[in-house]
Amino acid sequence: MENIIIIGAGPAGISAALYAARGNLTPLLLNNGIGALAKAEKIENYYGLERPLSGEELYERGVAQAKALGIRIIDAQVLGINGFDTFTVQTTAGNFDTVSVILATGGKRSAPNIPGIREFEGKGVSYCAICDAFFYRNRDVAVIGNSDFALHEAEELRNVTSSVTIYTNGREPEFSREHPIAVNTMKIQAIEGGDTVSGIRMEHDVASMENEDRESFYPADGVFVALGTAGSTEIARQMGAELTDKGNVRVNSEMETTIPGLFAAGDCTGGLLQVSKAVYEGSMAGINAGKYVRQRKRQQTEK
């Protein structure tokens, strides 16, 4: 059983790990790459920088600092988190049990640029299989994505729905294991329907078509969006943690979400999207997650 698992190796995640490690709590850091820092060509409005750094340089320095302190880092995609009292973090590198979790994977994701996605949000388009699978019992559903996150969502849906198909929207599948779920690799033209979603309009590869209609319609009662990897907002929503009106993870002054033991820091909490804010919130999350773990251990000892 881990004490603290930190998801994300950006400024918030690394800062949380540093403070948790200083508190002798041996955190485990799950790293799925550079994230939003990759878009920062030059960072110069941060304390202590003699010269501007690129986002990639800052990221690499942070990871090196964590490794120098002996923090364990595993490169893996997080697929989901189960539990309430203690947690099981499901990843592509296996499952890990932990007392506390800190979400630090950046801000909420934009909806894909597919006509109909935004129009049908809440009317058949969903971003959380665990949350909404119940509403599609014995019905046909689609999952948009091409990674293990999409596969994980499809497997959750497969337990209750009649059929599930993964649509990669023209991308090559990047699943790390074999599976029995149908996959459609054609480009998506639009999500269609009336009051609710009725299906997906696809566009065939022009080169492979002669006189046939290039477009095809595939019926679906629900469409679940699972692009890339699971971010902090997606994970929080899956777990039942409360989000703000703007769709960010709601936290208190100690960076704890509405689920005890689940903390969040950085861009996923909204507000100023700056490295300085992420570092502060990560530090607070690391300190307070440590307090939570020690309190839990005292309570177990007293029983």
Image (cartoon, grey):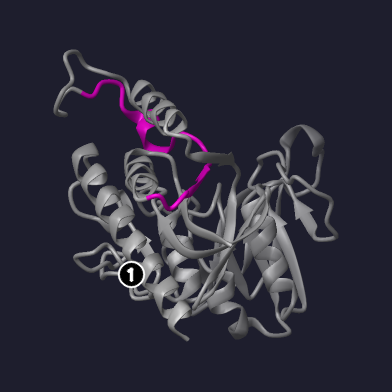
Placement of the N terminus among the 4 image quadrants:
bottom right
Q: In this view, does 158 lie to the left or right of 64?
A: right
Q: Indicate the quadrant where residue 268 lies.
A: bottom left
Magenta stretch contains residue 31: yes
Q: Residue at x 19, y 65 (%)?
A: 253
| 222 vs 174, nearest the viewer | 174
Percent across and percent down for residue 128 are 53, 69
Q: Can residue 197 be seen in this view?
A: no
Q: Residue at x 27, y 18 (%)?
A: 53
| 140 vs 249, nearest the viewer | 249
Q: Can residue 250 be seen in this view?
A: yes
In this picture, which residue range is highlighted in magenta? 24-43
Dot 1: what SS? loop
Q: Mark 1 points at which residue?
A: 257
Q: Indicate the quadrant where residue 240 lies.
A: bottom left
Q: Residue at x 37, y 24 (%)?
A: 61
Percent across and percent down for residue 117 are 48, 61
Q: Residue type at mark 1: give it.
A: Thr
Percent across and percent down for residue 184 are 75, 52
Q: Is residue 295 left or right of residue 208?
A: left
